[in-house]
Amino acid sequence: MTHLIRADELAHEIEDVVVLDVRWALTTANTGAGREDYDAGHVPGAFFVDLDTELAAPAGDGGRHPLPTPSVVQALLRRAGITEDTRVVVYDGKESYAAARAWWVLRWVGVLDVRVLDGGYAAWLAAGLPVSTEEPADRHGDVDVRPGRLPTLDADGAAALARDGLLLDARAPERYAGETEPIDPVAGHVPGAVNSPTSAWVTGDGTFRRDLAEHWARVTDGLDLGNGQVGVYCGSGVTAAHEMLALAELGVDTVLYPGSWSEWIRDPARPVATGPEPG
């Protein structure tokens, strides 16, 4: 089953799905920009979702974007009338980084059919499809969430997977190498992790590249995959979900380290590696 949907396909199915608008960017977090974008125009019938408050818990020992409190996600699902059997489509502005976080979180609490609008709102506009400034009314649903439907890694699990399987670091190469760190107080990566930048999985228009299998083959070329398990982390567990979405399209099962680098460095006893990948 594909986890992506094109703009024209969504337009055809829009009466049969619940649409969530998750526009957000790390550089504009907590400024209300996503909400302002939504108010200016969105896919008709879409509910706005705030990533920082509805798809993540407050920053703390669990990192910059810990997993959200289940009751918060439940309130979101009830507002949008979503049950575990509802067909859901999520989108953000373009590259689907934030939408992928929603895709993962909803599946984590038990919503089975969640797809991402490939290319986001930009693709919807490019297709010449109608937009709306009306916000749908609260649907007052009564669903009960069931968190934990997807596996996760803690710091110890991530360290073990870096040794025994494949742990992907989805950040930019210069952050992985420790050459620069614009967000977190410590630069570098989890020892043994392999750099696979999230940005390399999309094209210039924000859609996923069509040669995903070939790109994955290049990422893993020459690697010892150990036990065959694949984990993914990034800075705070948001863009890692994007890489997981790309791999899901290939049928590759992955597991998220939600705390990611921002949690890893909270414990000064945890080792930090720097420099590019060997070879």
Image: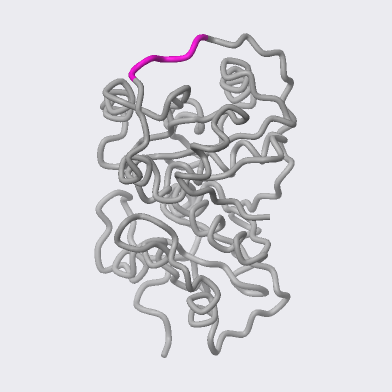
Front-lying residue, 13 or 100: 13
Residue 265 visible in image: no
- Asked where in the image residue 180 lies, by quadrant, the reply is bottom left
Quadrant placement of the C terminus: bottom left
Magenta-tinted stretch = 133-137
In the image, is residue 252 above or below residue 114? below
Q: Is residue 107 magenta?
A: no
Relative image position of residue 74 (x, y in whole percent):
64, 21
Residue 207 visible in image: yes
Relative image position of residue 200 (x, y in whole percent):
38, 67
Q: Most prominent secondary structure in the magenta stretch?
A: loop
Q: In the displayed structure, does residue 174 sit left or right of residue 165?
A: left
Instruction: Identify the residue at image location x=35%, y=36%.
Output: 24
Instruction: Identify the residue at image location x=50%, y=59%.
Output: 243
Instruction: Identify the residue at image location x=71%, y=25%.
Output: 83
Q: In the displayed structure, does residue 1 sit left or right of residue 214?
A: right
Number of numbered callouts drawn: 0
Q: In the displayed structure, does residue 270 sit left or right of residue 142?
A: left
Instruction: Identify the residue at image location x=37%, y=36%.
Output: 129
Quadrant placement of the N terminus: bottom right
Q: How is the image coloured?
A: one colour
Relative image position of residue 146 (x, y in whole percent):
74, 30
- Asked where in the image residue 244 lies, by quadrant, the reply is bottom right
Relative image position of residue 192 (x, y in whole percent):
52, 74
Front-lying residue, 232 or 144: 144
In the image, is residue 152 above or below residue 231? above
- Asked where in the image residue 234 lies, by quadrant, the reply is bottom left
